[in-house]
Image (spheres, rainbow, N blue to C red):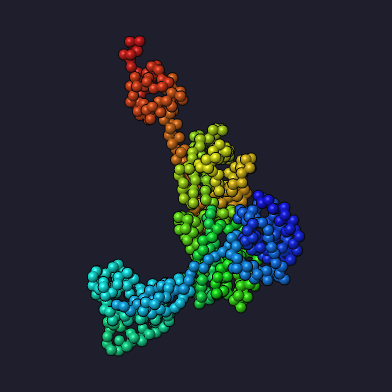
């Protein structure tokens, strides 16, 4: 708790209700946060009031505030411009800061030995020819890879003429992506001509390359050099094929950037896909701390991104609400010197592009966290669908299984980071009542699980950790039966049901009296379906084992003198009923809790009555 809160609260209450920028400072006088406000008094005083419900990051910032300063502005727009300038100047610790790591790229053309080209980050004084600089690293490296494939140039690390005719062709040659100079299938002159055409293709584009190649092909045809003409025809077809493939990531909007943020339990990833001339030309991603207020975070991310970029497109597509979007659009328009709009696509091509951007962000975040991109995307989508503050890292799911009320059991499965966490699976035998009552069974199981949490919470493992989300196999009835249990122990754990259709397949998520459709959320739907199938399998497996054991036990308890205790002792000792049936009287009587008469009764039940022994007695 910050000891200066009362002073800071009193100072903030004296601020005017006008637009401005505020600067939070630590005990060293360093600026740790810069913010803007439409009404300074309301915004700044909110930091120093009640800490309940305050985001963790904000609470940490407030704990380190020694004092604050402020600058009055004439409008919210002027405050935004000043905020951007101060953030760029001071790089405050608690503002979202995106670091530009792209740098410049060049095309390096080497001429010592066989002519070749590659993408490099530095221009050296080494006698090579350099074309550039290019700020779009993705575009230039992708263009070089594409050009080498089209003009059948080597993509390996072999150096010519050193490695000329020293090895057999690699796989690229056999799939039609390399002419294999290493095996002598391309001369130096042919290689040099291919390099020149590839570089021309990169610089001037596919249209100019096709035009020049078509003229060359016609020239060879007129000179009856049909083999050479055919090779050029193949290159033209390769360029057209690549151009067609690029349409997959083309858009009807000429110029736009697409933003998407995917979150995990600890970090988030901002992915940006950039389009120019209706084609994707660049992608970027940034790993950031987990945002707690997504509309505010999107505002900060967009502001921070264009603070380190020279170009602002006419249209910016985002995956959700943006705080103060009108003011932000005004600021972006002033940078671009033309109107800029911020939109949230809901359907069609633009929505598909947004999903592609989210998929890229999930993949990058998954790699960063050591998870799969698929699981990261599914958890993020599920968390957003259910309105959770962050994606659920630990999910517990429960199902009840019985046969007409007998052998009533429950299964609990745990999914960690979107995949089964089998070491935390648990089984429950319903003890509170007999008969069939799924609602009461579910309530009993959840209460027993919670009581175990209070017993083991110091361990932080197994039952000692509460889940981020509970999913019950069933609808609103199950949710309503369990909800009072969570309220009884003052636990605020998100609780939902998993509803099946008539074919026993996952259909929707159940709330307390309502349902959320999963059909439009493919990743979340797949994850929930997997969880529901897994918990059902686990519960029914336990039920079947209990039922089988009960059936076997009844074989023994039907014998006179063998009750539940002796039955359990026999099965514990011999493991199976078959082993019990094959045991001798001496072996049976040696079991704890058994005597000679009980052993004889069991032996005779399986082998028939021994008349000789009766005569001896």
Residue 5 as seen in the image, left or right of residue 120: right
* In the image, residue 41 above or below residue 172: above
In the current view of this chain or complex, which residue is farthest to the front?
28
Q: Residue at x 54, y 72 (%)?
A: 309
Residue 37 as seen in the image, left or right of residue 547: right
Whole-percent x, y for residue 46 in the image: 70, 57
* In the image, residue 537 above or below residue 42: above
Whole-percent x, y for residue 207 in the image: 42, 82
Q: Nearer the viewer, residue 59 or 174?
A: 59
**Is residue 143 in view?**
no
Q: Residue at x 49, y 34 (%)?
A: 407
**Is residue 564 in view?**
yes
Whole-percent x, y for residue 455 in the image: 56, 36
The image quadrant of residue 237 is bottom left
Residue 616 as seen in the image, left or right of residue 298: left
Count the numbered circles shown.
0
Q: Nearer the viewer, residue 137 or 23?
A: 23
Whole-percent x, y for residue 123 in the image: 42, 75
The image quadrant of residue 228 is bottom left
Q: Residue at x 72, y 64 (%)?
A: 39
* In the image, residue 371 above or below residue 481: below
In the current view of this chain or complex, which residue is farthest to the bottom?
222
* In the image, residue 560 above or below residue 380: above
Q: Residue at x 26, y 79 (%)?
A: 187
Q: Quadrant of the C terminus?
A: top left
């Amino acid at each position: 708790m910050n000891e200066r809160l009362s002073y800071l609260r009193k100072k903030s209450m004296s601020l005017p209700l006008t637009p401005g920028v505020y600067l939070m400072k630590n005990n060293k006088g360093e600026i740790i946060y810069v913010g803007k406000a439409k009404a300074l008094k309301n915004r700044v005083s909110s930091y120093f009031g009640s800490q309940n419900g305050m985001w963790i990051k904000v609470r940490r910032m407030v704990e380190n505030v020694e004092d604050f300063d402020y600058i009055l502005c004439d409008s919210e727009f002027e405050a935004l411009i000043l905020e951007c300038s101060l953030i760029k100047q001071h790089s405050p610790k608690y503002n979202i800061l995106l670091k530009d790591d792209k740098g410049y790229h060049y095309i390096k053309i080497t001429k010592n030995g066989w002519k070749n080209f590659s993408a490099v980050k530095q221009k050296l004084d080494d006698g090579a020819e350099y074309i550039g600089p290019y700020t779009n690293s993705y575009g230039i490296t992708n263009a070089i890879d594409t050009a080498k494939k089209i003009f059948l140039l080597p993509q390996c690390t072999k150096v010519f003429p050193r490695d000329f005719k020293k090895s057999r062709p690699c796989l690229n040659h056999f799939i039609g992506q390399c002419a294999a100079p290493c095996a002598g299938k391309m001369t130096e002159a042919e290689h040099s001509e291919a390099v020149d055409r590839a570089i021309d293709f990169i610089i001037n584009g596919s249209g100019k390359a096709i035009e020049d190649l078509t003229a060359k092909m016609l020239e060879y045809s007129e000179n009856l050099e049909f083999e050479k003409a055919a090779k050029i025809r193949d290159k033209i077809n390769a360029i057209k094929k690549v151009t067609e493939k690029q349409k997959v990531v083309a858009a009807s909007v000429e110029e736009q950037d697409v933003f998407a943020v995917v979150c995990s339990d600890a970090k988030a990833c901002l992915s940006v896909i950039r389009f120019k001339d209706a084609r994707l030309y660049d992608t970027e991603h940034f790993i950031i701390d987990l945002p707690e207020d997504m509309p505010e975070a999107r505002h900060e991310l967009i502001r921070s991104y264009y603070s380190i970029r020279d170009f602002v497109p006419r249209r910016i597509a985002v995956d959700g609400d943006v705080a103060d979007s009108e003011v932000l659009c005004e600021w972006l328009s002033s940078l671009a010197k033309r109107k800029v709009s911020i939109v949230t696509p809901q359907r069609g091509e633009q929505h598909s592009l947004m999903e592609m951007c989210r998929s890229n962000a999930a993949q990058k975040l998954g790699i960063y966290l050591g998870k799969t991109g698929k699981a990261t995307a599914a958890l993020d989508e599920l968390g957003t669908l259910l309105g959770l503050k962050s994606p659920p890292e630990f999910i517990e799911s429960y199902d009840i299984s019985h046969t007409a009320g007998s052998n009533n059991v429950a299964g609990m499965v745990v999914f960690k980071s979107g995949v089964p966490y089998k070491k935390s699976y648990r089984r429950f035998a319903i003890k509170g009542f007999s008969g069939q009552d799924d609602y009461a069974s579910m309530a009993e199981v959840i209460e027993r699980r919670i009581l175990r949490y209070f017993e083991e919470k110091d361990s932080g493992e197994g039952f000692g950790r509460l889940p981020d989300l509970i999913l019950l196999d069933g609808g609103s009835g199950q949710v309503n039966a369990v909800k009072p249990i969570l309220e009884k122990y003052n636990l605020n754990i998100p609780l939902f049901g998993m509803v099946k259709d008539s074919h026993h397949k996952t259909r929707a998520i159940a709330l307390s009296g309502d349902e959320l459709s999963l059909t439009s959320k493919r990743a979340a739907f797949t994850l929930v379906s997997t969880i529901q199938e897994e918990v059902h399998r686990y519960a029914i497996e336990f039920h079947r084992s209990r039922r089988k054991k009960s059936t076997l036990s009844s074989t023994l308890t039907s014998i006179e003198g063998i009750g539940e205790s002796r039955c359990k002792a026999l099965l514990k000792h011999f493991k199976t009923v078959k082993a019990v049936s094959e045991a001798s009287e001496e072996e049976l009587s040696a079991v704890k809790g058994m005597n000679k008469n009980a052993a004889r009764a069991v032996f005779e039940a399986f082998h028939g009555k021994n008349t000789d022994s009766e005569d001896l007695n």
